[in-house]
Amino acid sequence: MYNMNTITIYFILAVLYFLGLFVYKVERESILFGVRIPPGYKDRKEFSELKREYRKRLSLGYLPLVLIYIILSLKINPVWSVVLGDTLVFIEMIVVGANYYKMNKTIKLLKEAEKWEVITEDKSIDDEDYIMGFIYYSRKNPATYIFNKEEGKLYFNFAKPLVKISALFLIGVLIFIFSTTLTFPWIFKDRKVEILDNRITIEGKWGVTLNKEEISKISLERNLPMRIRRSGGKSINKMIMGSYKVFNYKEGHFYIMDRSKPFISINTKDNKVIVINYEDTKETESLYELLNNR
């Protein structure tokens, strides 16, 4: 089914595809797929053929996966749609990078075979010191970074331990952020509520336990409290889970599977609010009756 999260993923995939498809158009006139070329070489016939080959290969590797995702996203629930979509974005980034890298190596081999002479203002610039034309990696240069006068850009030297460690740290952070998406199917699901003696427990991540004497009111409502900011939670389309700072309340705990459906509101004497519902409205109503009768 379509939802805002899935539509956002569609948009990201489209932008990534067109950026990858025409990446060579945003390069400087003296650079093709990250390789410096002599003046006037960019219009060579064989380069036009290489560009067509690159676009074809990228499209064949990219578009079938997107088509499969679009078909699956119409059939699976929104949570799995987001998980699958985020995974696909990660895979497609690799597809684009791999195709660019292959073309970079092809141009480098052609440059070496034909012994192109490229004159640059900065004599220290060497294509062999760059991975895909934008990652500077030079063991022979002791500097941690260089300023490329020709391009007016600062490049960090990824051959140096400090830069390597920093890059690995950033990659680790990105992998961690991505991996949290994989937990969504276990977060966004109907919550089990345990009523035992004088305690009510909502189980799962960001769950909460409260004693009955803490409760001031239990009601069935339709208008959710206004969330101000998230203190420990996530939301996907119509689903809201976790802890939030809530307008007119000390804090709020949300376990909402569908914000458009009725929900149970549990108000406490210390001005906290817990809201919960299920995908099936009848289950929500049954829980409401159970809470009021115990």
Image (spheres, rainbow, N blue to C red):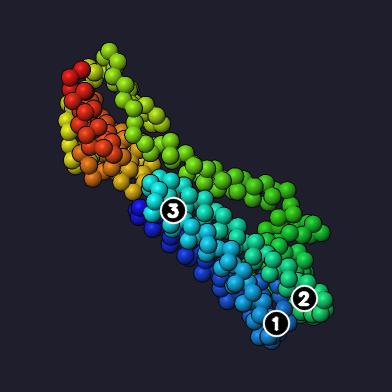
Element type at marker 1? Answer: helix
Residue at horizontal 65 percent and vertical 61 percent from the top:
98
Query: Is 12 situated above or below 76?
Result: below
**Mark positioned earlier in the residue sequence (2 or 3):** 3
Identify residue for label 2. 110
Q: Which percent across, then down, holds residue 112?
A: 81, 74
Q: Which percent across, then down, holds residue 205?
A: 41, 31
Query: Is 170 situated above or below 19?
Result: above
**6 on left or right of 36:** left
Disc 2 marks a residue whose amino acid type is Leu
Identify residue for label 3. 72
**Mark positioned earlier in the residue sequence (2 or 1):** 1
Classify residue 258 by image quadrant. Answer: top left
Determine whether label 2 and label 3 are within 8 Å by CB. no
Query: Is 85 situated above or below 289?
Result: below
Q: Which percent across, then down, holds residue 101?
A: 68, 64
Nearest the eye: 81 or 11: 81
Gap in angstroms between the C-alphas marked 1 and 3: 40 Å
**Is any part of residue 276 visible from this angle?**
yes
Identify residue for label 1. 46
Q: Which corner quadrant holds the C terminus?
A: top left
Nearest the eye: 54 or 15: 54
Residue at horizontal 38 percent and vertical 42 percent from the top:
234
**Mark positioned earlier in the residue sequence (1 or 3):** 1
Disc tally is 3
Residue at horizontal 64 percent and vertical 66 percent from the top:
100
Q: Residues within 10 Å of mark 2 (few under 14, many from 20)?
A: few
Element type at marker 3? Answer: helix
Disc 1 marks a residue whose amino acid type is Glu
